[in-house]
């Protein structure tokens, strides 16, 4: 008996009790998904965790969003150009233009070179996770395609308190419609940072160096 035959013989012996009548489908398991974890202050915890990533979080009400977005652009050092997704709230866009910024709409799509030359991007969000301080984009109309949130050096992101959930499973549960619709998901935890083998930190390799979060209280 050669090695191949020996392996096959072992498999046959190990599966001798399995018959053709055994089910070919996974059996359902009673399990609760996306239940979340108990947290005294979900929104406050989210803010604390985001700030741990050296990102900035400011709170505002609905009426204060345009002003807060402009303040975020200035605080992150954006000087001239801003790119926005096609479905971004028009009042935010008007405020950005009124502040003297050149605003580019991503329709038709800008080239990667054009995005790289843009100071900042402004988007909304789909979900936010308190336990990890993570923002999730599902790239619908007010968030735009993935490149918009990855190439520019600064990201001003509007997160609504109603979108903030306790943990990752709860967020995934809330995002199921987006997944079923085929939308990609991008998880953002602070500005982009990585380290080489010598633990030398490098910012901006995988996305914007600076993240500024406008947290909208309901």
Image (tube, grey):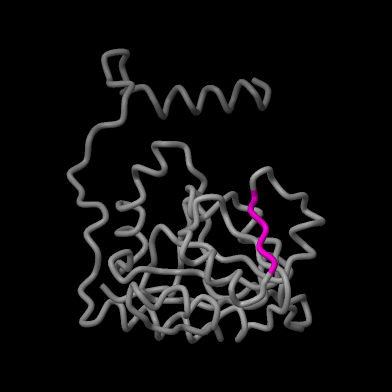
Magenta stretch: dominant secondary structure: strand
From this view, report whether residue 40 is shown above or below residue 124: below
Provide residue 133's location: percent of width, then percent of height.
Answer: 43, 75
Provide residue 43's location: percent of width, then percent of height.
Answer: 31, 78
Number of callouts in the render? 0
Q: Nearer the viewer, residue 70 or 141?
A: 70
Q: Quadrant of residue 101?
A: bottom right
Residue 99 magenta-drawn?
Answer: no
Most extreme residue toward the right is 113
Which residue does the image show at 64% across and 45% down from the upper left? 107
Which residue does the image show at 52% across and 46% down from the upper left? 184
From this view, report whether residue 2 is shown above or below residue 92: above
Which residue does the image show at 48% across and 57% down from the upper left? 137
Q: Quadrant of the N terminus?
A: top right
Most extreme residue toward the top is 20
Which residue does the image show at 68% across and 43% down from the upper left? 108
The segment highlighted magenta reads 102-106
Q: Quadrant of residue 96?
A: bottom right
Q: Nearer the viewer, residue 61 or 190?
A: 61
Provide residue 134's location: percent of width, then percent of height.
Answer: 45, 69
Q: Quadrant of the C terminus?
A: bottom left
Q: Nearer the viewer, residue 92 or 84?
A: 92
In the picture provided, is 174 more to the left or to the right than 124?
left
């Amino acid at each position: 008996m050669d090695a191949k035959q020996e392996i096959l013989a072992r498999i046959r012996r190990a599966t001798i009790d399995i018959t053709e009548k055994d089910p070919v489908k996974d059996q359902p398991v009673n399990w609760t998904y996306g239940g979340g974890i108990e947290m005294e202050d979900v929104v406050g915890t989210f803010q604390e965790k985001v700030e741990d990533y050296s990102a900035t979080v400011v709170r505002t009400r609905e009426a204060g969003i345009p002003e807060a977005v402009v303040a975020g652009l200035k605080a992150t050092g954006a000087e001239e150009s801003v790119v926005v997704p096609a479905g971004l709230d028009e009042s935010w866009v008007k405020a950005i233009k009124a502040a003297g910024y050149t605003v580019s709409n991503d329709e038709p799509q800008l080239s990667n070179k054009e995005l790289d030359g843009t100071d900042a991007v402004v988007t909304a969000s789909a979900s936010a996770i308190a336990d990890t301080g993570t923002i999730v984009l599902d790239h619908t109309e007010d968030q735009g395609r993935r490149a918009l949130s990855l190439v520019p050096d600064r990201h001003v992101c509007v997160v609504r308190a109603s979108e903030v959930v306790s943990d990752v499973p709860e967020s995934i549960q809330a995002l199921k419609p987006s997944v079923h619709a085929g939308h990609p998901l991008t998880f953002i935890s602070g500005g982009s940072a990585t380290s080489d083998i010598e633990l030398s930190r490098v910012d901006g390799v995988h996305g914007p160096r600076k993240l500024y979060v406008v947290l909208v209280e309901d």
